[in-house]
Amino acid sequence: MYYALIDCNNFYASCEQVFDPSLLNRPVVILSNNDGCIIARSKEAKRLDIPMGSPEFKIRPLIKKHDVVIRSSNYALYGDMSRRVMETLQSCTPNLEVYSIDEAFAELSEGYMDSLEAYGQFIRKRVLKWTGIPVSVGIAPTKTLAKIANETAKKYPSLNGVLVLDHRDKAEKVLNRIPVGDVWGVGRKYAKTLQKNGIQTAFELTRQPDSWIRNTMKVTGLRTVWELRGKPCLSVEQTVEPRKGILSSRSFGQPVKNAEDLKEAVTLFASRAAEKLRAQESVAGTITVTLVADKYADHNGQYKFGISVNLPNSTADTTIFSAVSKMVVDQLFDFSKTYKKAWVMLTGIVPESEIQAELFNPSGYSSRQHKLMESMDAVNARFGKQTMMIAGAGVGSNQSWRMKQEHLSPRYTTRWDELMNV
Amino acid sequence: MLYQQKIPEQSKRPSLKEKRSMETGFPSPATDHLEDRLNLHNHLVQNEAATFFCRIRGHDDEILGLYDGDLLIVDRSLAYKHHSLVIAVIDGEQRVCRLWNKGNRWSLQFGDNSFHHLEQNGGAENLLWGVISHVVHSCL
């Protein structure tokens, strides 16, 4: 059994290039919400050393000089293209774990094709042909090695986008070039400790005795090292565990038939989920709203309808979650249906302490929002649940929702009036 | 008694037939033969992940049978064949053209009846954006 990590190359920039070929072979940068700072770059922009996270005004001279194309983040487009890529991958492999908007793990078995290399090329070519998105494929006996194989495949164009680490010496050669801090699961904190102990590369890490690793990096660290040695510890399901979502749901007392009631319900679920999220001092990057219609009203039809929204910035802000939930209801609501249940799920959860401070990004989860949320939780804890709530459409959120998007490309795949013209 | 017991059991599982037959008199003789309505989307879109919609703008492609405002269904997963109607990327712009194949030679025919010959190994694949599988033309 082998694992493949399939990762889209410069995903956001690639999405823009699929529909606007004049952007091909040109430096393209994507700005965060409100056109704050750079969150993605095409490979040409990377080559110009345009730094990630820098605010747009700071690199204006560079933009002028090299004729860099600027785009506001078009999440409607990226979300739909991501779904297409994942669906295409599902047609290539039976067991897929969608890991993020642009990465997925797949289980591959040998013998399905002539070689694992051929399998990797098959996947790469199919995704490129079907969706226009270039991907890199790393294949190895463990997920951690697959991740490294993928990054290496991306780095060296001569590999043609696919690297298979199926032999020990092949893996060792690659691990020798990987700084220990770049290993998936090691993290910045452990990297420092390891470097202090004279361990610089991933290969050196694999040569340390188990007992020492367990002492310094705990069991999870040991697992990482075993994975580097080629002993699988993470399966396609297991990695989902720690990223498990927070769910808030309830069946309705009365079947619900109008959009306003549904919105009220999902707003409530969203605020509850956000409360749970804040209780564990975390932020979430994705919110999924699902509506369940009466299963028996239409026997053959679909009765569960859900949309996942990837938030531009991870947050624990109730106002944002409620606003997004309402938007989703607007999209999903079908007046011919009666709804029996709904749920709101938050995923992509990371500890609040881990989110990168986007200093220049006003839409990030700021300390002011954080204080507001804290006081809201305090009031609710003292006077009972839902004493203090987000009013209707979220009075405070309206303003923040209207983003600054001066360089926005059309939503080519999700709007009739914004289709690609030929 | 037996009759009464049967009724609630039936109403637990409302079927297509019951939902549609509102009449209180004779049941429609067609109820046993009801089938799903034809779904145009399923007909036009065979491969959801690879299918994109585009719009014809302007009058440059009328020779190819495409008119301003026509909706193109482009299935990128389809193989390029002789006489395929395709979208090609020429000078950073998407254009509709007819693909011609003669022996080893492949060429593109544009709406103005001009031709562009594809190099044998000049990355012709990169030039082609997708195969148009259907055209939806509004008559209004």
Image (spheres, helix red, strand yellow):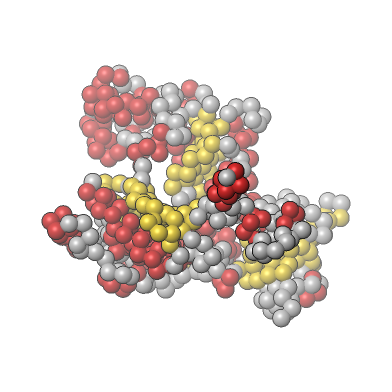
Q: Residue furthest front?
A: B1
Say which quarter of the image contains residue B28. bottom right
Residue B102 appears in the picture as rendered: yes
Q: Position of residue A229 (x, y in %)?
A: 41, 24
Foreground residue among A20 and A218: A218
Q: Is residue B121 left or right of residue A217?
A: right
Foreground residue among A346 and A412: A346
Q: Residue at x 26, y 27 (%)?
A: A218
Residue A88 appears in the picture as rendered: no
Q: Is residue A412 left or right of residue B129?
A: left
Say which quarter of the image contains residue B117. bottom right
Q: Position of residue A202 (x, y in %)?
A: 36, 30
Q: Residue at x 39, y 56 (%)?
A: A252
Q: Quick one: quadrant of the C terminus of chain A?
A: bottom right
Q: Is residue A61 left or right of residue B92?
A: left
Q: Position of residue A98 (x, y in %)?
A: 47, 44
Foreground residue among A373 and A88: A373
Q: Residue at x 26, y 29 (%)?
A: A217
Number of disc labels: 0
Foreground residue among A136 and B69: B69
Q: Residue at x 79, y 72 (%)?
A: B65
Q: Against A54, is B58 above or below?
A: below
Q: Against A23, is A105 above or below?
A: above
Q: Against A154, is A68 above or below?
A: below
Say which quarter of the image contains residue B70. bottom right
Q: Position of residue A152 (x, y in %)?
A: 47, 38
Q: Residue furthest bottom?
A: B140
Q: Residue furthest left?
A: A382
